[in-house]
Image (cartoon, rainbow, N blue to C red):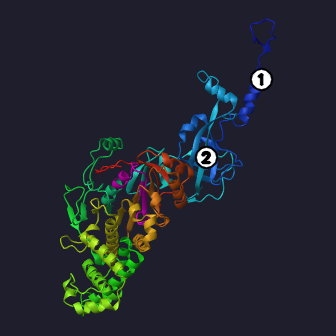
């Protein structure tokens, strides 16, 4: 037997080598037991294993531990599959916290770890470490590929496997017609939403501070919606979208498009409409038209709310409206004498939704003025503006005296506000037509209602109220015609820019009838392929009633913690980690939540190929 020296010192005892027979016996036993241990075959491909739960564990989440060489393979929001040990169940989950690096066998703040980190001199003394992350369970996988809500939890030491890009896309349901951008942590996964009735007519909120990328998101969506044959209507209060028919010339946007292998290009089939007597922000657009508002299309209750009338003025307004309506009926203006169809329509009118047909603002001013003169006991003979009242002045006087007009000051204030509205020359102006709703709602048509040359919120809200009502009426007619013809209806989406100015919390309190109209449009629109998109940089001004109408969300950077907390209470399904990242999002990043997606995602929104006049 050969001696082996363990030291150069001759006084140190020498050790004998292991006998060959012993080594052969050990080798035989290993082979008889199945060979060298190569790990659990069920763990092949696993990059981590579930840990034990602790008193601080949360329902629906599981802690996963990883070797240090796989930490970088599971970035935030990655999807994983957990094959539960022993019970054979398979779970899907998403990384919502981590991965974090922790030292092996020591606390991260242990003195020896801190000392080794600070004075390690090239990390020679650095402790070995592992990774830890938290996953949120998405569901339990079935044998047929279906996914159920998780009723149990994976057992400890269960292997964790990363999903491939194809599997991740399938689980997240990111396929669709409208491309939004690239999923963060998944550079090869495009996030899309389908242009189907189950998604887009379920109204959308695009929220974010100035400069966060809302306009980029909206204009990019419009180009794809137009290509998909969807009619788009913009209520553009700043004129920002009046140049989207042209390709972008912004150098930063061009560079971003190039990195995404996308090409700049304008939106086809765009038309600009502006109020008569006002200008458009883009007079060089090839298709610009003016339009008027029709007093008869607006509910009297909506008008009185938008005009901000006092209690006595509201009462006088409704009295004058009822007298005017009665006189127009008696004088055959509407319904025309002998026209049974119009008589039936008059009986079915809902004044909470529409005004009185063929009634103009000047008709109402005439009646209110005569009521004022009666209350003031004026000696001069009334001289109405409209010939139909002048020719029947005695009948008009009889009807106005029947309401016993009193309190001259209220009538004078009402007449003053009506004349102020009339001087805007937007109601019943023969120099411009009404909006061509049938043309606006054709397949692939993009209509931009340019309200940028209008400083009055009152005037903007009147225009928006009439447009929403007109779009809804036309969409219902088109829907019925399409169903009768056995054809699919043309989907329509209305974008309301600066939605907080139209539907703020304060306005909702003062204008409940207006909000009820918007709510009816929102509810009926879902059944008629009519969707609303609310865009605002001040989401704190949107009331809970409006937030309750929205099912899909694009949330850009929102820095106000109070606003984030309020949205958190209104929007379900977004995990805590995404809410925490919302105040620090970069321009162009957004948390998106659509009914078509299995869970909300953090997305790098694609750059817009269109030209914006004022990029925020």
Q: Residue at x 42, y 61 (%)?
A: 204
Question: Label 1 vs label 2: CA separation?
Answer: 51 Å
Q: Residues within 10 Å of mark 1 (few under 14, many from 20)?
A: few
Q: The N terminus appears in which quarter of the rendering? A: top right
Compared with 47, 432 (above or below) is below
Q: Earlier in the sequence, mark 1 or mark 2?
A: 1
Is 107 in the magenta? no
**Mark 2 highlights which residue?**
134
Secondary structure under tag 2 reads strand
| Res. 545 visible in picture | yes
Residue 61 picture location, percent across and down: 62, 51
- Drawn side of residue 315 relative to residue 428, left or right: right
Q: Residue at x 23, y 75 (%)?
A: 428
**Mark 1 highlights which residue?**
21
Residue 337 picture location, percent across and down: 24, 92
Residue 429 picture location, percent across and down: 21, 73
- Drawn side of residue 56 relative to residue 256, left or right: right
| Res. 341 visible in picture | no
Compared with 285, 54 (above or below) is above
- In the foreground, 43 or 504: 504
- In the foreground, 481 or 171: 481
Please provide the residue range marked out in magenta: 192-219
- Drawn side of residue 507 relative to residue 281, left or right: right
């Amino acid at each position: 037997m050969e001696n082996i020296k363990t030291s150069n010192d001759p006084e140190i005892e020498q050790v004998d080598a292991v006998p060959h027979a012993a080594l052969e016996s050990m080798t035989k036993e290993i082979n008889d037991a199945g060979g060298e241990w190569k790990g659990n075959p069920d763990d092949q491909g696993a990059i981590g294993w579930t840990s034990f739960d602790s008193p601080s564990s949360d329902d629906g989440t599981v802690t996963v531990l990883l070797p240090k060489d796989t930490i970088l393979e599971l970035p935030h929001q990655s999807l994983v599959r957990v094959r539960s040990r022993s019970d054979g169940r398979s779970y899907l989950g998403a990384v919502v916290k981590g991965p974090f690096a922790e030292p092996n066998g020591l606390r991260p703040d242990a003195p020896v770890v801190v000392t080794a980190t600070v004075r390690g001199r090239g990390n020679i003394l650095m402790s070995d470490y592992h990774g830890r992350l938290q996953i949120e369970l998405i569901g339990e996988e079935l044998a047929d590929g279906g996914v159920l809500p998780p009723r149990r939890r994976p057992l400890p030491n269960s292997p964790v496997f990363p999903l491939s890009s194809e599997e991740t896309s399938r689980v997240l349901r990111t396929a669709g017609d409208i491309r939004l951008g690239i999923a963060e942590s998944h550079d090869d996964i495009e996030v899309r939403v389908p242009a189907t009735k189950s998604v887009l007519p379920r109204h959308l909120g695009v929220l974010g501070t100035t400069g966060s990328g809302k306009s980029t998101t909206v204009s990019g969506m419009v180009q794809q919606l137009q290509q998909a044959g969807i009619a788009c209507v913009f209520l553009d209060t700043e004129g920002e979208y009046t140049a989207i028919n042209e390709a972008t010339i912004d150098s930063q946007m061009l560079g971003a498009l190039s990195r995404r292998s996308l090409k700049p290009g304008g939106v086809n089939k765009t038309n600009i409409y502006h109020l008569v007597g006002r200008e458009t922000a883009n007079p060089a657009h090839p298709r610009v038209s003016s339009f008027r508002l029709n007093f008869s299309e607006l509910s009297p209750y909506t008008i009185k709310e938008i005009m901000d009338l006092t209690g006595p003025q509201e009462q006088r307004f409704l009295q004058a409206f009822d007298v005017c309506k009665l006189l127009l009926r008696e004088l055959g203006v509407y319904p025309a004498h002998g026209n049974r169809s119009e008589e039936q329509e008059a009986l079915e009118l809902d004044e909470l939704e529409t005004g009185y047909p063929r009634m103009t603002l000047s008709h109402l001013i005439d009646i209110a003025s005569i009521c004022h003169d009666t209350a003031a006991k004026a000696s001069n003979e009334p001289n109405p503006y409209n010939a139909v009242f002048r020719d029947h002045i005695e009948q008009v006087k009889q009807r106005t005296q029947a309401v016993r007009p009193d309190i001259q000051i209220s009538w004078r204030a009402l007449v003053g506000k009506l004349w102020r509205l009339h001087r805007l020359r937007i109601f019943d102006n023969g120099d411009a037509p009404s909006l061509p709703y049938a043309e606006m709602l054709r397949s692939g048509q993009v209509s931009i209602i340019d309200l940028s040359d209008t400083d009055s919120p009152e005037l903007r809200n009147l225009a928006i109220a009439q447009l929403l009502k007109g779009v809804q009426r036309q969409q219902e007619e088109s829907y019925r015609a399409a169903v009768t013809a056995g054809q699919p209806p043309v989907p329509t989406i209305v974008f309301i820019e600066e939605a907080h100015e139209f539907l703020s919390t304060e306005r909702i309190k003062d204008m409940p009838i207006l909000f009820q109209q918007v709510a009816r449009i929102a509810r009926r629109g879902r059944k008629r392929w009519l969707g609303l998109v609310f865009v605002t940089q001040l989401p704190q001004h949107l009331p809970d009633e409006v937030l309750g109408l929205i099912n899909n969300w694009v949330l850009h950077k929102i820095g106000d913690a109070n606003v984030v907390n309020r949205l958190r209470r209104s929007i379900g399904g977004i995990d805590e980690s995404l809410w925490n990242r919302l105040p620090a999002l970069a321009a162009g990043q957004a948390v998106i939540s659509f009914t078509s997606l299995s869970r909300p995602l953090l997305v790098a929104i694609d750059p817009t190929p269109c030209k914006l006049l004022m990029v925020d």
